[in-house]
């Protein structure tokens, strides 16, 4: 009834302006007649409206709050599971769709691990069967694997979500862990990985517990376009990665040497892409650019990053420059941070900072190779707060662990809802 009253009031108010305009064209006497006639018509129409509104309210009374709450409770269990940060990032960067399922291109993958935001685009490109077959026909074999593979393919290929997880895993693996990764795929222990074994482990990558019952649900079925409810393909389609590793017929096998080469090339390609963004084609980057690359992947606040850079500028005015190989060696060392942490445990127990000599020795123990002395010195100038030549390895490890887990960086997390608000408060209190 209150709603009907408001609607009647609005109708009457809306009729006033036209009546005033209309009456100005006639004499006062005629305008009065027209105004009375118009007002009477409006009242009649409004009365009819009130009658029908009241009749509908009686026939269909509004739901009580308890009923509404009950309905919300019944539909609560049907809400889709919340996506992880990796899933959100995959959806954000995936630019193409095939038969109702979304995929990344090789270019999308490279951008997802080197850029904060995807490039602007209008919707996702829908790939036809004919276009996909043309793409897959041009995929190079594993014999032609190189550090240019993903860049040369550009947008002519597709990568599924489970393969995206596999590739992310490669980027964070130390070389010493390549054999462990190979053995995980080699289920029968014959030192060769076939397509079937690869798909079994790939399915493990695509499993996630979505509810309290502990039921594992394949993530692949989530990545459907809004127009599709179910995948229209039976089993996993041929993708760029599968063709590259196992051939067009899927009968090729991987030995460890080939597997190692693929993983090493992928790491090198991503690192080279990052390096070139700063070197602009030159053979070296300066020490400040090196620091910017390291800090861009961390959750350090903007003010903290600027403090690191200012400290470096004051302490190193004319640096030697850092080559790609030196940059690559340092980044591959970062993949062994867990082993490095163990090597530094004695200093943790004693709560003692470490010198450059001790740092280089711990790197040698955990990686088996040395890091260029001027690179170590640059790291110390960035993280040595008081300039005493000692490094708080706890702070260094904390910041560098963020750098290793590229693509799921804290500053890319969108604060949404109550959980997001709690995370934001916790992060701000931690950095205060």
Image (cartoon, rainbow, N blue to C red):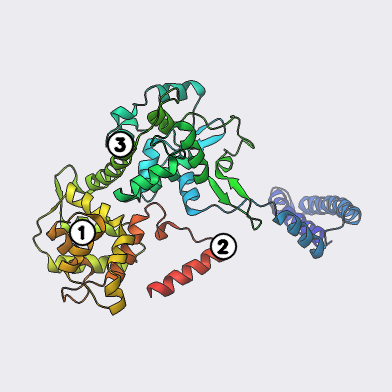
Q: Nearer the viewer, residue 151 or 14?
A: 151
Q: Decide if residue 128 is on the left or right side of residue 281.
A: right
Element at label 1:
helix
Q: Image quadrant for the C terminus?
A: bottom left
In this rendering, the answer to whether 244 lies above or below 22 is above
Question: Where, by quadrant of the figure, is residue 118 drawn?
Answer: top left
Q: In which quarter of the image is residue 229?
A: top right
Give the Cα separation between the discs numbered 2 and 1: 46 Å
Q: Which numbered disc, 2 or 1, marks the residue that appears first in the sequence? A: 1
Whole-Å distance between the Cαs marked 2 and 3?
48 Å
Circles 2, 3 touching at the beta carbon (< 8 Å)? no
Quadrant into which the N terminus falls: bottom right
- At 37% across and 53% down in the image, what residue appears? 406
Residue drawn where x is 44% and y is 25% of the image: 251
Callout 3 secondary element: helix
Q: Which of marks 3 and 1 is nearer the N terminus?
A: 3
Residue 96 can be seen in this image: no
Q: Where is residue 127 in the image (x, y as percent from the top left)?
A: 49, 28
- Marks 2 and 1 in Cβ contact (< 8 Å): no
Asked whether residue 237 is in view, the answer is yes
> Mark 2, residues whose alpha carbon is within 10 Å: few (<14), some, or many (≥20)?
few
Q: In this view, does 72 lie to the left or right of 236?
A: right
Q: With 349 as the anchor, is 134 left or right in this view?
A: right
Q: Name the residue under label 2.
A: 417
Disc 3 from disc 1: Cα separation: 24 Å
Mark 2 or mark 3, which has the lower sequence index?
Answer: 3
Query: Please, is residue 104 above or below residue 39 in the view?
Result: above
| Picture layout, residue 404 above or below residue 237 | below
Residue 298: which quarter of the image?
bottom left
Rate crowding at label 3 as few (under 14), some (14 to 19) or many (20 or more) other CA atoms within 10 Å.
Answer: few
The residue tagged 3 is: 257
For mark 1, what is the residue? 364
């Amino acid at each position: 009834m209150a709603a009907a009253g408001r609607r009647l009031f609005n109708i009457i108010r809306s009729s006033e302006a036209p009546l005033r305009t209309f009456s100005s064209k006639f004499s006062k006497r005629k305008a009065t007649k027209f105004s009375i006639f118009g007002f009477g018509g409006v009242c009649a129409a409004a009365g009819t409206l009130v009658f029908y509104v009241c009749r509908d309210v009686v026939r269909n009374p509004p739901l009580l709050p308890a009923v509404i709450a009950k309905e919300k409770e019944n539909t609560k269990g049907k809400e889709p599971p919340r996506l992880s940060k990796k899933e959100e990032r995959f959806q954000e960067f995936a630019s193409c769709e095939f038969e109702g399922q979304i995929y990344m291109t090789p270019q999308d993958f490279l951008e997802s691990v080197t850029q904060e935001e995807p490039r602007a685009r209008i919707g996702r490109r829908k790939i036809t069967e004919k276009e996909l077959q043309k793409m897959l026909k041009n995929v190079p074999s594993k014999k032609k694997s190189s550090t240019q593979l993903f860049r040369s393919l550009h947008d002519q290929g597709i990568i599924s979500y489970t393969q995206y997880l596999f590739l992310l895993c490669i980027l964070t693996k130390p070389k010493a862990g390549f054999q462990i990764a190979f053995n995980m795929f080699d289920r029968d222990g014959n030192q060769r990985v076939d397509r079937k074994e690869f798909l079994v482990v790939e399915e493990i990558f695509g499993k996630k517990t979505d509810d309290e019952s502990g039921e594992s649900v394949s993530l692949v079925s989530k990545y459907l376009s809004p127009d599709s409810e179910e995948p229209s393909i039976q089993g996993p389609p041929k993708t760029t990665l599968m063709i590259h590793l196992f051939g067009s017929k899927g009968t090729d096998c991987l030995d460890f040497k080939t597997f190692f080469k693929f993983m090493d090339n992928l790491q090198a390609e991503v690192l080279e892409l990052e390096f070139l963004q700063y070197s602009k084609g030159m053979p070296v980057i300066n020490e400040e650019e090196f620091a910017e690359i390291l800090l861009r992947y961390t959750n350090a606040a903007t003010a903290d990053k600027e403090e690191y850079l200012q400290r470096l500028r004051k302490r190193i005015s004319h640096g030697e420059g850092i080559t790609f190989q030196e940059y690559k060696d340092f980044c591959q060392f970062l993949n062994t941070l867990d082993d490095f942490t163990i090597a530094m445990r004695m200093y943790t127990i004693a709560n003692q900072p470490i010198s450059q000599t001790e740092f280089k020795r711990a790197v040698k123990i955990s990686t088996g190779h040395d890091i260029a002395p001027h690179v170590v010195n640059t790291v110390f100038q960035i993280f040595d707060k008081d300039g005493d030549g000692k490094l708080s390895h706890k702070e260094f490890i904390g910041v560098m662990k963020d750098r290793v887990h590229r693509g799921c960086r804290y500053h890319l997390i969108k604060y949404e809802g109550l959980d997001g608000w709690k995370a934001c408060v916790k992060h701000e209190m931690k950095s205060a």
